[in-house]
Amino acid sequence: MGSSNVVIGIVIAIIVVAAILYLISYFMRKKNQERLQALEDRREQLFDLPVLEEVDDVKKMHLVGQSQNTFREWNQKWNDISTSSFAELESQIFEVESLNETFRFFKAKNAIADAEQTMDTMEKEVEQIRAGLKELRESEERNSLEVQKALDIYEDLKKNLREQGEEFGPAYSELQKQIKNIEIEFTQFVTLNTSGDPVEAREVLENAEQHTYELEDRMKRIPAAYEELNKTFPDQLKEIQDGYKKLLEDHYVFPEENFQAEIDRVKKRVETSMGDLEKTEVDTVEVANRDTASGIDSLYTVMEREINARRYVVKNKPVIADYITHAHRNNHQLMIEIDHTAQSYTLNHNELGRVRGFQSEIDELTKRNKDLEPKMEAHEIPFSEIQAFYKDAYKILDDLENQQVEIDNELRELRKGEKVAQEKVEQFEFQLRNLKRFVEKQRLPGLPNDYLEFFFMATDRVEDLGKALNKIRVNMEDVNKIMKNCESDIKELDTRTHDLVDAAALTEQMMQYANRYRHSHAEIKAAIEGALELFNKEYRYQDALDEIGAALERVEPGAFKRIENFYFKNRDLV
């Protein structure tokens, strides 16, 4: 019985193991089959891509040059993939199917991985091929547009030359040749490209495009240049030539001796430029035309200068003569005034020498103006030269008149200044008398020496001012200096006088107030005695005030300031 159970257990174990192995093999086979099916689907999708059609489309574009070489590379890669790579993938897929059917699942799994790797590589390469073909197609389309653009421009240039040929003047024939040469280049490009010589065809095309754009630029610029050479410049030169002739008939004189030669030189440049235009040398023509325009402007400027100068001379000729006469008359009158003034005043600024210098300048202007008269009558001098002299003369005369007026005002100021100084002398003397009476009214015991010295000095200074004003020839610079010092002295004397009187009055007020402490405070008694000595014998009123004030302040703080404030508030009552 026991052995039967063992046998049954072994059988069951074998069945279970077999079932497990079956299930494992089933699932591995199914998994491999699913991966294989996915690989098959990817292959079909890759195979269905329109790569061949895209290759054919690009091939039909008849690429040339580097574009053709690039296309050949992509085409070769596609051929390699469509033959070798697809064949290798088919072989790998067949091997996977065989291994999977014979239950060699692990080898099948590895084979599938290899096939997937091959598939990945093929997909990536096909993607690169399609992208490269797309870039070639778009690039060629762009190139085609550029070629078409150049052809369109070429057609427009040919049409413009045919319909508007008169606008190009002598350049017409040369432009026809250049258009014909471009046509030959485009024809040569088509021939070479069709015959399979893409490299040379591309070079010819690039030359044709470049020549087309260069011709377009020239044809845009030529009409304007021709308009200048054919009409603008000739009309202007004719106007200048006719105007110059008319001005000569009207007796104009030009400082430029070679004016006619300059006209001829500009005419010659126009002729030369017309020859350059015939050869379509536009750059050279445009540079020359700028020089021509500048030369014509210069000619116009010269003529306009002389015309305007004549108007100026005609208008200002009588004015300048009157102005010179006016300056001469003013200067003569000023010299008389200086002579008269010099009898009463010292002149310190070389007035006479300056006015004599003015006369020399006026005489020189008179001489130059008279010298111009016969030359103007004989038409021997350009109006612009006369104009320049008139303008210089105006500047000189304006400056002379300003200086004449300045000197005349200075002479008038001498008399005014003397009158003011005389009034100041009287004012100073009056102030001195008032100060003297003011001091005398104070009935002071005496005056300090330094005050007296300053008073006498101020008095002497006023006397000096009077003497300076009484001279036969008054030197107003000296008078003004003395007068300024007198003003300063009187002001200082006034201050000193009032300080002196205030110090004396305050001293008396302080001593009167301090008497109340005379018998109770020895120092007050001593201070009073000392202040009296300074006051009555030495006349040092400020020192006396300081001594009594200091002593009183020590006995009764604040008393000094109180008495002082009362005094200045009631000065007129004290």
Image (spheres, rainbow, N blue to C red):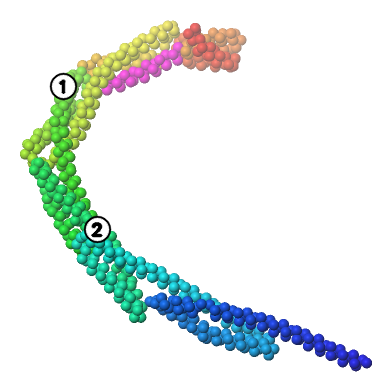
Please state which amino acid type lies under the numbered disc 1.
Ile
Q: Is residue 472 above or below residue 317?
A: above
Q: Is residue 139 above or below residue 537?
A: below
Secondary structure, mark 2, is: helix
Task: Measuring from the top left, give residue 135's x and y in whole percent.
Answer: 46, 72
Q: Would you say the magenta stretch is mainly helix, strand or loop?
A: helix
Q: Is residue 123 above or below residue 534?
A: below
Please state which amino acid type lies under the numbered disc 2.
Pro
Q: Residues within 10 Å of mark 1 (few under 14, many from 20)?
A: few
**Residue lying farthest to the front in this orientation:** 163
| Residue that label 2 marks | 223
Q: Nearer the viewer, residue 18 or 404?
A: 18
Please give the name of the residue rendered at 77% of the width and 85% of the height, measured from the top-left corner: 20
Please give the name of the residue rendered at 44% of the width and 13% of the height, measured from the top-left corner: 498
| Residue that label 1 marks | 336
Task: Measuring from the top left, give residue 438's x and y in whole percent.
Answer: 41, 9
Using the rendered image of the protein, determine whether residue 174 is visible from the camera's viewpoint: yes
Task: Measuring from the top left, give residue 34's x and y in whole percent.
Answer: 66, 81
Quadrant housing the N terminus: bottom right
User: Is 498 a magenta residue?
Assistant: yes
Secondary structure, mark 1, is: helix
Please give the name of the residue rendered at 18% of the width and 24% of the height, measured from the top-left corner: 334
Please give the name of the residue rendered at 38% of the width and 68% of the height, measured from the top-left corner: 145
Classify residue 104 by image quadrant: bottom right
Q: Nearer the viewer, residue 186 or 340?
A: 186
Q: Which residues are magenta?
A: 477-501
User: Is 439 a magenta residue?
Assistant: no
**Residue lying farthest to the right in this orientation:** 1
Task: Measuring from the top left, give residue 243's x and y in whole percent.
Answer: 13, 46
Lower position in the chain sequence, tag 2 or tag 1: 2
The label number, if any, that marks residue 478 in the structure image: none
Looking at the image, is mark 2 or mark 1 nearer the viewer? 2
